[in-house]
Amino acid sequence: MINKIVPRKIEIIQSYYEEAFAILGPKRKTPPIEVIFYPYVGINHTIRVRDGQVYVRIGEICRDMPRSCQNALAYILVAKLLRKAVPIEARDLYSDYIKTPQMRERAADSRRENGRKVITTPVGENYDLNRIFADLNRRYFRSRLAKPTLTWSARQTFRILGHHDSTHNTVVVSRSLDARDVPKYIVEYVVFHEMLHIYHPTQHINGRRYNHTPEFRRDEAKFEFFHEAEHWIERNVLKLKRRAKRK
């Protein structure tokens, strides 16, 4: 069963949605509302209307969320459904809760356990990500950086050339760069950038995420072909786009 929660608690949470409808849509008749907890990956919730009934799905990770935050979430979801402004107090109360270190850790655990990551191969037709990582690790990190899972993307992309997924400890590089007309230093630069995300983990300050800190940018500029790589990517983005669309 998806829902293993005492009816009384569900009734209380359901009453929050009835209250939100009455406050945010006073001229509307409050529709029947069904609330359940659903095993979404991470912190996700949905509210939908079907055949005159409202269906609310609250992420399982928030099953133990305090009632005050459940009440705030009700106002947030109902406001979005009715296309109303989200009450500031509700937004701040819910936001402060989900940004706590405990909730971030639980969300990461949820994504790690239930999320899916498409892994292809680190060995491309032209470039081997394993060898590139080992060489960069020796040159810039004294071989101290633990090797993550390295993989070429499943499809050719042009908007995102590289991505570090800390949840799954994976570095993904766009397959559009695994081509003869792409200089090796471009692939190295993209891999190096993602390695820096491992070396300089995301910082959480006052509820905000900082991925590219001054320290990150300082070390990024140490790449031997930093300026050449930046210029090459800028000049060739349209070519990468055409290549991705052909595929």
Image (spheres, rainbow, N blue to C red):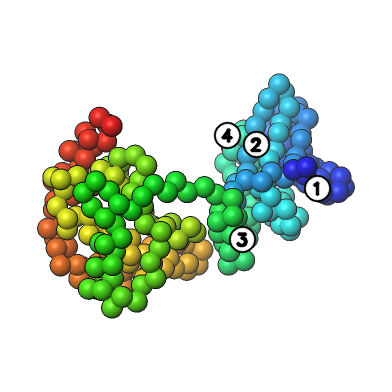
**Residue type at mark 3?**
Arg
SS for callout 3: helix
Neighbourhood count class around disc 1 (C-alpha, 10 Å): few under 14, some 14–19, many 20 upward: few
Closest to the observer, 37 or 117: 117
Residue drawn where x is 71% and y is 33% of the image: 55
- In this rendered view, identify the residue nearer to me: 131 or 91: 131
Residues at marks 3 and 2 touching, judged by CB atoms closer than 8 Å: no
Which structural element holds mark 4?
Answer: loop
Q: Which mark is residue 83?
A: 4
- Name the residue beneath numbered marker 3: 106
When the figure is inspected, residue 1 is found, relative to residue 26, above or below; the finding is below
Residue type, mark 1 in image: Lys
Q: Amino acid at mark 2?
A: Ile
Give the crowd class for mark 4: few <14, some 14-19, many >=20 residues within 10 Å.
Answer: few
- What residue did someone put label 1 on? 4
Q: Quadrant of residue 193?
A: bottom left
Kind of residue indicated by mark 4: Arg
Please state which of the two labelled residues, at mark 4 or mark 1, is closer to the viewer.
1
Q: Residue at x 49, y 59 (%)?
A: 167
Q: Name the spot of residue 97 as percent of width and height, x first.
A: 63, 60
